[in-house]
Amino acid sequence: MAQDSKHFKYLLIGGGMAADKAAAGIRTVDQTGTLGIISADSDAPYARPALSKKLWVDPDFKETDTDFKTAAEYKAEIFLNTTVTAIDPQAHTVTTADGTQFSYDKLLLATGSQALQIPGPASDLAIALRSKADYRKIRAFSGQHKQVLVVGSGYVGSEIAAGLIQNDTQVTMVISGKRIYEDRFPGYLSEAYQQKYLDAGIKILTTAYAKNYEVKDGKVELHLASGKTLVGDGLVLGIGGRSNFKLGKAAGLATDHDGIIVDEQLKTSAPDIWAAGDIISYPDKILGRQSSAHVNHAVKSGMIAGKSMAGAAVTYDYTPSFYSWVFDISWDALGHISSQMQMYAEKLPGNKSVVYYFDEHGLIQGILSWNSKVSLNHLRHLLKKKPTLSQLQQVLPLEKVE
C-alpha cells in the first residue's frame, strides 16, 4: 500500500556528485524552493574519485573529508537507502521500492552508473568498487601484508591497485591486455605506466581473463579462463561500469544507445524532467552528441541542470576532460583517445608529453596531456578548432608514435 505522498518543488533521483551540484545550481537561483534527494546509496553525497585515489595516498585526508554536507549546505532533505522503481511523468510522481510516493514540480535524473561484475557469490570479500560502503569493505580486507586480487586495468582497477600497494598490501592484477592502458596510450607511455606498477611490487598477469570467483574459508578463489586459480584475502573488480538509465527509459523518456537524450539545457523529452551525469546523451559543442562517465562531466552537467531547473537561461557547452593519477604520473585527456588511431606526440622536457589523436582522414579526435602543465582550456580550444594533422605539424614538433 502506498504511503502518504511527499511533495517537493525540486526532486532529484540519485545521490552522487551530479545531484550535489544540481542542488548547488538550484540554490544559486532559488534559495527557498523545497528540495528532496532520493538516493539508493547508504551515504549522503560525497567525492567519489577519492575512493580509489586520495583516501589511499594522503594520510591527512580522512573519509569524512569526502562529505559534501549537501543537506545542510543547500537545505535539502535526503532519503538514503531508497530505490525509485517508477516515474509517472504525466502525474509528476515517483514511487519507491517501499511504496512511498513522491510528487514534484521539477525532476532530475542523475542515477549514474553500475559497476560491472563477474559471476560469484555476494560477499564483503569481493567488491566492485563504486560506493563509500565498498571502500570500507576493501579497507577491511587490505593492509597487514594481505594479498588482494585486482581485476581490470581501467580507472578503478589501476588506481586501487596503486593505492593498495602503498598501504602494506600485496597486489596481483589480472588484465586482459599486454599492458595497462595499451588501448588508449602509445606504447612508450603504456610501458612507462606499467613499469611503475612492477617497480612498486605489483604482480601483473597479462592477457588473462577472470571467469568467476568463489569464497571459501575466508579466502577468495579467482578462476581464470586459462584454468588457473588465484587465491587472495580479497578481490576488487575494476572492469568498468554501465550507464544506469533504465528508470528513465521505462518512464518513456527518449533514449539512444548512450543514455537519456537531453538538449542544451539538459531537458529530457518529458516536461519538467532534466537529466545529468553518466546517464545522458548530450550535444557536445566540440565532439557532437555523446555520453561521458567522468567526474568533471557529472559536476558541470549537474550544476547546469540545477540552474536550468530553477529557471535560469543556461546551456551546457562544456567539453569535459577525464584524468587519473597514480604514483608520480598524472594525465588528462579530452575527446576520443585510442591507440588504434594515428598518434603524434609533442615530447616535452622531463618525460612529459602531449599526444594528439587523429582519425584516418587526419582530423584531430582527442588529446592526451601526460605529466604536462599545458592548460586544459588551451587544449580544449585547440580541439574545438579541429586542425588537421598537416596543419598541426606546421606549428608543433610532432613525432609519430605507435
Image (cartoon, rainbow, N blue to C red):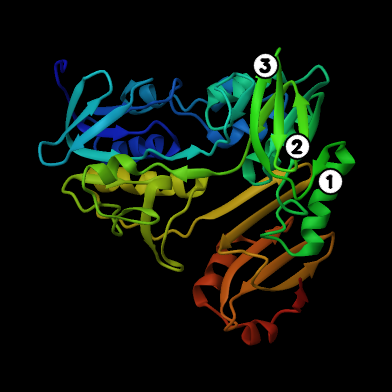
Q: Amino acid at mark 1?
A: Lys
Asked if the residue under mark 2 is in contact with the one under mark 3, i.e. CB atoms within 8 Å, the reply is no
Which of discs 3 and 1 lies nearer the camera? The answer is: 3
Q: Amino acid at mark 3?
A: Ala
Horizontal and vertical percent position of residue 122: 54, 22
Q: Which residue is mark 2?
A: 162
Horizontal and vertical percent position of residue 12: 30, 34
Q: Residue at x 58, y 32 (%)?
A: 128
Q: Which residue is mark 1?
A: 196
Q: Residue furthest front?
A: 227
Say how many tags the image has: 3
For numbered disc 2, what is the local secondary structure?
A: helix
Task: For label 3, count other residues whose C-alpha is less than 10 Å away and answer few (under 14), some (14-19) or many (20+).
Answer: few
Q: Which residue is mark 3?
A: 140
Q: Residue at x 60, y 25 (%)?
A: 135
Task: For label 1, count other residues whose C-alpha is less than 10 Å away and answer few (under 14), some (14-19) or many (20+).
Answer: some
Say whether residue 41 is visible: yes
Q: Earlier in the sequence, mark 1 or mark 2?
A: 2
Q: Earlier in the sequence, mark 3 or mark 1?
A: 3
Horizontal and vertical percent position of residue 150: 71, 35
